[in-house]
Image: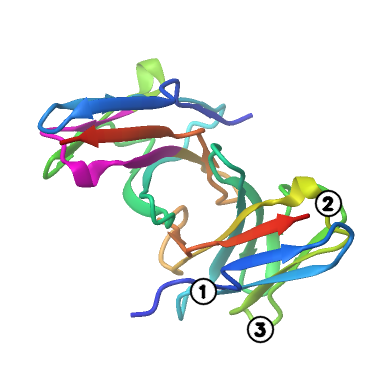
C-alpha cells in the first residue's frame, strides 16, 4: 500500500531563514511519481514539482530545491531565504506507476514565515 | 486560460438531504479527479475519470457517493442521505492527455457543511 508521511505538522521561521520540509513515502512499485503542492491561505492547491522514480537528480528552481533519495524513500523540499509569501501548507504526494493516476497525499506541513 | 471551476463554492445542507457538486475541468483535459479534504488533513482520493468512464472509484467511501461525467467534460459528484461526517472541502482536478501521471490542476473546491 502506498503512504506518504510528513512528520512536521507546523514549522515557524523568520524571514530569510532556510527551511526544509520532510517527506517520506512507502510504495511497493518500482515506478512511481512524487509531487509537491502548495496550498496558500486562499485554499487552491498549486503544483510545484513532479519527479519520477527513475530520476534521482536533485532539482533547483529559484529559491526552491528538492532532494530525492530512493535509499531513504525521501523527497525533501527546501526553501532558501524564505519570504512571508511562502507561508502556506505544503503537501507531498505519491502516484504509483501502474493503473490509477490517483495521488496519495501526506497530511501536510504548515509553514509560517514571520517578518 | 480558464482553470478548473467548481460550483457551488459553499453548500450547507441538512443531514439526510441529497447534494450535487459540479466540476468544470480545463478545456481539453481528459482526466478528471475528485478528492475530499477534511480540516487539517491532506486531500483524500475519491474517484478518477479518464474520458467518460470511471477508471478508478476505489476511494468512494460507500454507496451514498456517486459521480458521473457523461460527455467527458463536466463532472458531478452526488451524495445521497448526507451525514455530518461528509462535511469537508470537495476538490476537483484535471490533467491533460499528454502523459501518464502528469500534474493535476486543482479547482478552488466546494465546502460542504452538513448540519
Q: Chain of mark 3?
A: B
Give percent across and percent down for residue B76.
Answer: 69, 72
Is residue B37 a member of the stretch shown in magenta? no
Residue extent of the magenta highlight = A76-92
Mark 3, other Cα within 10 Å: few <14 / some 14–19 / many ≥20:
few
State the residue at coordinates (37%, 39%). A90
Nearer to me, B90 or A69: B90
Determine which residue is flagged by label 2.
Answer: B83
Which numbered disc flags the more N-terminal residue, 1 or 2? 1
- Per the rendering, the mark at residue B71 is 3
Image-quadrant location for residue A83:
top left
Residue at disc 2, secondary structure: loop
Q: Chain of mark 1?
A: B
- Per the rendering, the mark at residue A106 is none
Give percent across and percent down for residue A113.
Answer: 23, 35
Determine whether, in the image, residue A114 is placed left or right of residue B67.
left
Which numbered disc flags the more N-terminal residue, 1 or 3? 1
Amino acid at each position: 500500500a502506498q503512504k506518504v508521511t510528513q512528520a512536521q505538522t507546523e514549522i515557524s521561521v523568520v524571514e530569510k531563514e532556510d527551511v526544509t520540509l520532510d517527506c517520506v513515502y512507502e510504495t511497493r512499485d518500482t515506478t512511481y511519481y512524487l509531487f509537491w503542492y502548495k496550498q496558500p491561505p486562499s485554499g487552491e492547491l498549486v503544483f510545484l514539482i513532479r519527479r519520477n522514480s527513475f530520476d534521482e537528480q536533485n532539482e533547483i528552481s529559484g529559491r526552491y530545491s528538492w532532494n530525492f533519495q530512493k535509499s531513504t524513500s525521501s523527497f525533501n523540499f527546501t526553501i532558501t531565504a524564505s519570504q512571508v509569501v511562502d507561508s502556506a501548507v505544503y503537501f507531498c504526494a505519491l502516484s504509483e506507476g501502474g493503473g490509477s493516476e490517483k495521488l496519495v497525499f501526506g497530511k501536510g506541513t504548515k509553514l509560517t514565515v514571520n517578518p | 486560460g480558464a482553470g478548473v471551476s467548481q460550483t457551488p463554492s459553499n453548500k450547507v445542507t441538512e443531514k439526510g438531504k441529497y447534494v450535487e457538486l459540479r466540476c468544470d475541468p480545463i478545456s481539453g483535459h481528459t482526466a478528471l479527479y475528485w478528492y475530499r479534504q477534511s480540516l487539517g488533513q491532506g486531500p483524500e482520493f475519491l474517484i478518477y475519470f479518464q474520458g467518460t468512464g470511471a477508471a478508478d472509484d476505489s476511494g468512494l467511501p460507500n454507496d451514498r457517493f456517486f459521480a458521473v461525467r457523461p460527455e467527458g467534460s463536466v463532472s458531478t459528484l452526488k451524495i445521497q442521505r448526507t451525514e455530518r461526517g461528509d462535511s469537508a472541502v470537495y476538490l476537483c482536478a484535471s490533467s491533460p492527455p499528454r502523459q501518464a501521471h502528469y500534474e493535476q490542476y486543482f479547482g478552488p473546491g466546494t465546502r460542504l457543511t452538513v448540519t
